[in-house]
Image (cartoon, grey):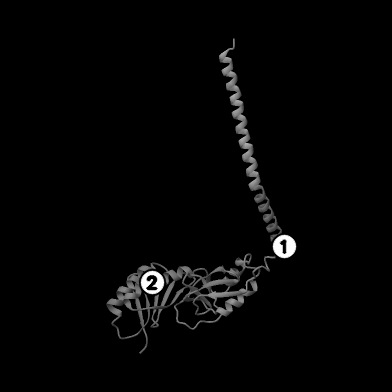
């Protein structure tokens, strides 16, 4: 007599083996199809990459798309576009992709009147250079000029434009520029304008106005003395017909006035 449970068990095992073989056959077939489809493409990609690599190694980037022109942009009063272009061209070396932009920047920022520059490539063979020119605000010492950013530079040629003049110890130009702005703001209600500001080695302040009047503030309590001068000038001195030569505010409880000779 045949054991039915044994038969069922044997059939189940054979069924699992047949199903496993079918699954393996399906995956093998899928792998063959995938390899058949993608193998030529993979070979093509590798081939193209190899060609590009060989070509890149043979390309001279200095000769590929060389820079043909340099365009200068900006609004200038003291600089000239042709001067900037002549300064830039000798350092424009290389092609479009490998031109040394820092070298171009350094060549131009070394010019006295150049405040800042920006450089960009323009396809296929041009450099665009935008230059920001310094704005002079005051003279410093005998030959120096201060820009609106407080940068001290030597312009080369002497300027003829009218600007306030500062003179003081070396390294004090930024402090004096700030004081000029502050003191001039306090003097606005008097109608006086500062033409010269001097800070001597003893740190004593002297202001000379456009009218030629000299205001001596000394080295201590400078701001308090200036405020006191503004009050005195508005109340008593502004209505005077005589011209003032100088006013000395260095007294504790008063001031001294010297008049110009009639």
Q: Residue furthest front?
A: 1
Q: Quadrant of residue 252?
A: bottom left
Disc 2, SS: helix
Along the line of sight, the residue nearer the viewer: 17 or 99: 17
Position of residue 21 measured from the top left corner of the image (x, y, whole percent): 62, 30
Q: In the image, is residue 107 above or below residue 24?
A: below
Q: In the image, is residue 53 above or below residue 38?
A: below
Q: Are marks 2 and 1 in contact (CB under 8 Å)?
A: no
Along the line of sight, the residue nearer the viewer: 107 or 251: 107
Disc 2 versus disc 1: nearer the observer: 1
Position of residue 140 measured from the top left corner of the image (x, y, whole percent): 50, 75
Along the line of sight, the residue nearer the viewer: 46 or 247: 46
Q: Which residue is mark 1?
A: 58
Residue at image x 63%, y 39%?
Answer: 29
Q: Which residue is mark 2?
A: 183
Q: Quadrant of residue 227?
A: bottom left
Along the line of sight, the residue nearer the viewer: 188 or 221: 188
The N terminus - image quarter: top right
Sort mark 1 into few (<14), some (14-19) or many (20+) by Cα contacts within 10 Å. few
Disc 1, SS: helix
Question: Alpha carbon of mark 2 to alpha carbon of mark 1: how far?
Answer: 67 Å
Residue at image x 64%, y 47%?
Answer: 38
Sort mark 2 into few (<14), some (14-19) or many (20+) by Cα contacts within 10 Å. some
Q: Is residue 112 visible?
A: no
In this picture, residue 115 sits left or right of residue 208: right
Q: Quadrant of residue 92?
A: bottom right
Position of residue 84 measured from the top left corner of the image (x, y, whole percent): 58, 76
């Amino acid at each position: 007599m045949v054991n039915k449970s044994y038969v069922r068990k044997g059939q189940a095992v054979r069924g699992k083996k047949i199903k496993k073989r079918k699954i393996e056959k399906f995956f093998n077939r899928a792998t063959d199809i995938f390899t058949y489809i993608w193998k030529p493409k993979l070979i093509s990609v590798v081939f193209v990459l190899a060609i590009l690599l060989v070509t890149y190694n043979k390309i001279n980037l200095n000769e590929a798309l060389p820079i043909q022109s340099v365009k200068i942009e900006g609004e200038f009063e003291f600089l000239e576009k042709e001067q900037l272009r002549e300064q830039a061209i000798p350092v424009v070396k290389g092609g479009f992709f490998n031109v040394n932009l820092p070298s171009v920047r350094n060549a131009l920022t070394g010019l006295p009147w150049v405040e800042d520059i920006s450089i960009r490539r323009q396809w296929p063979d041009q450099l665009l250079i935008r230059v920001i020119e310094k704005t002079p605000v005051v003279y410093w010492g005998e030959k120096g000029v201060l820009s609106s950013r407080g940068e001290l530079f030597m312009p080369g040629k002497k300027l003829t434009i009218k600007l306030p003049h500062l003179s003081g110890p070396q390294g004090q130009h930024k402090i004096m520029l700030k004081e000029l702005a502050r003191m001039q703001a306090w003097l606005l209600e008097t109608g006086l304008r500062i033409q010269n500001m001097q800070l001597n080695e003893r740190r004593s302040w002297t202001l000379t106005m456009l009218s030629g009047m000299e205001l001596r503030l000394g080295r201590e309590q400078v701001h308090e003395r200036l405020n006191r001068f503004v009050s005195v000038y508005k109340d008593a001195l502004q209505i005077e017909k005589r011209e003032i030569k100088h006013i000395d505010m260095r007294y504790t409880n008063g001031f001294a006035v010297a008049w110009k000779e009639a």
